[in-house]
Image (spheres, grey):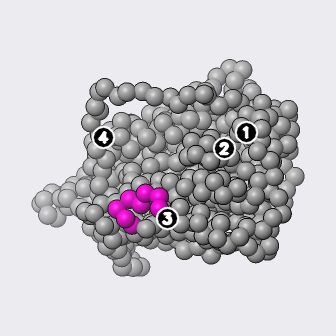
Amino acid sequence: MTLDEIIKSRRDTRHFTNDAIPDEVIQKALQAGHYAPSVGLTDATKYYIIKSAEIKKAVKDLFLDYDKKASNSTDDEQQKAQYKSLKLEAIEEAPLGLVIGYDRSVLNNFTIGTVGSNEAIKFSAVCAAQNIWLSLTEQGYSMGWVSILNYYQFKQLLGLPEHIEPLGYFCVGKPATDYDNQPMLQQLNWKQKQENPIIEEILISTPPNSVPDSLRGTKQSHTNDSIIVKELQQKIDNKTKPTGSLGVLESLAKQIGIVFQTLEPKITKPNIVVFAADHGIANHGVSAYPQDVTRQMVTNFLEGGAAINVFCKQNDIALTIVDAGVNYDFPTNTNLFSAKIGKGTQSFLQNPAMTQTELDLCFTKGKEIVNSIFETECNCIGFGEMGIGNTSTASVLMSILLELPIEDCVGKGTGVVDEKLIQKQNILKKALKNYSGPNDLQSKLAYFGGFEIMQMAGGMLQAKQNNMLILVDGFICTVAFLIAYKMNPSVKENAIFCHSSAEQGHQKILDYLNVQALLQLDLRLGEGTGCAVAFPIIQSAVCFLNEMASFESAGVSGS
């Protein structure tokens, strides 16, 4: 065959014969992969051969678990049946399994210059996969790419180190069909592939956007003082003012002094963390915006164009953006903290949003993120979020945690009103009614949770352990705090509730917690904007405690 014929006949194969593959066929194919481009000659592409029936079965089980979630992501029963009829893998049937991955650790010792791109070494591995495919095709064999997997569990199953990233699982063998010389989905009339490539010429150059530098530093610690409460109150009362005349600022100054166990507290390197993730429930019309807005807004955060960017810049607050589970693969060389659990949760209308393993991982990731920020000498952390559909998730969690009717918890979210709001209530009511799982909190958090909400809850618990000030934003962040509070009520000692949201459920949670929000501005944007806007008030409390004269120092009579 000519090269052109080989390229045209290459297929993503899902049907294989039982014929064994000669070693020389695999060796030739992998050598072809090795001849593929390797950015900076890093040799980052790695290959793992799998012949074990036990490992194949375990990989198949991972696929089936994720495939079930994929098929349940649509309410169209005909489309669901068509999807289920597709053969999407041959993990156990194919005589050989191949894992192609790339080694991120090569970026620590890059060949050319000092900067390497994770994306570039990933693309090198993809080039290797294509070369292997073409070599197998030329030899009368083929390959099928299986990517419907939870990659975190996939890596754990194979025992791959943290720095190795797999492209997926590849089934290798002699093809049992040529699919009528066309892609399988085209053969089954799902979709027709365009005959010609899409080509455009770019005529205008756009300058790149700048992003903040990543944060680094060292850990700090605070001493304990059992009489600090009394001393702080005396210091506040001795300032040159009538007793209690600074109102909330006085209680705020006292709280901050108690958290830091000092009469002269100082907020250092404040940081607001925005956790972003997608929600399966968004597919049922509970939001005024499509799910892709989550991805668009994360890009906006990274480019500095969102409200939270403006307010953080105004108040000299560092901003950290976390991909907790957005339905998109962001370039890994962006200033983004990747803690992706999955590409969005599943819809909890009929199925669990996440597994118990994913829930546990959310708490782990949230704690790791807060610890990494704490190590920059940050002692004040604000929590924000972004995720189309997350007011629905938060409303259901509030209903469960406070045992309230869903109607008392649901609000406008991104702006649903009138009949759309009633539709939103009915969908969430149906989801709660459909739940038939265990009655314990952990099971319900997994079934109805959101990746970003659970990561925030884990992060808040870690912030308490690190003795940091915890700034809580609006409705969704307060639901995350409520989860943390149920697990450790003492977390409230460190929390400052920055504003009372226009979401109807928010004030109900604040009342339950018996706390007062600093601001009432009818905000319902999220992103941590309430934390950023309230921050100057928090700084004012610290400033008056540290810098305002006492009656004695000013020579003013205290009575």
Which disc is residue 9 wearing? Answer: 2
Q: Earlier in the sequence, mark 2 or mark 1?
A: 2
Residue linked to disc 1: 181
Q: Which mark is residue 209?
A: 4
**Is there CB contact under 8 Å for labels 3 and 1?**
no
The number of discs equals: 4
Near mark 2 (Cα within 10 A), the count class, few <14, some 14-19 or many ≥20, is some
Which residue occupies 56% across, 53% down? 130
Q: Earlier in the sequence, mark 3 or mark 1?
A: 3
Q: Quick one: 61 or 86, which is closer to the camera?
A: 86
2 or 3: mark nearer the eye: 2
Gap between marks 3 and 1 measured at Cα: 28 Å
Dot 4 lies on which element?
Answer: loop
Residue 177 in percent (x, y) is at 80, 47
* Mark 2 residue element: helix
Please name the amino acid that badge 2 sits on.
Answer: Ser
Asked whether, in this view, residue 437 is left or right of residue 8, the answer is right
Q: Position of residue 370 (x, y in %)?
A: 45, 64
Label 2 to label 1: alpha-carbon separation: 7 Å
For the residues labelled 2 and 3, the Cα–Cα distance comes to: 22 Å
**Earlier residue among tags 2 and 3:** 2
Marks 1 and 4 in Cβ contact (< 8 Å): no
Q: Which residues are magenta?
A: 34-42
Quickly name the residue at label 3.
34
Label 1 vs 4, first from the N-terminus: 1
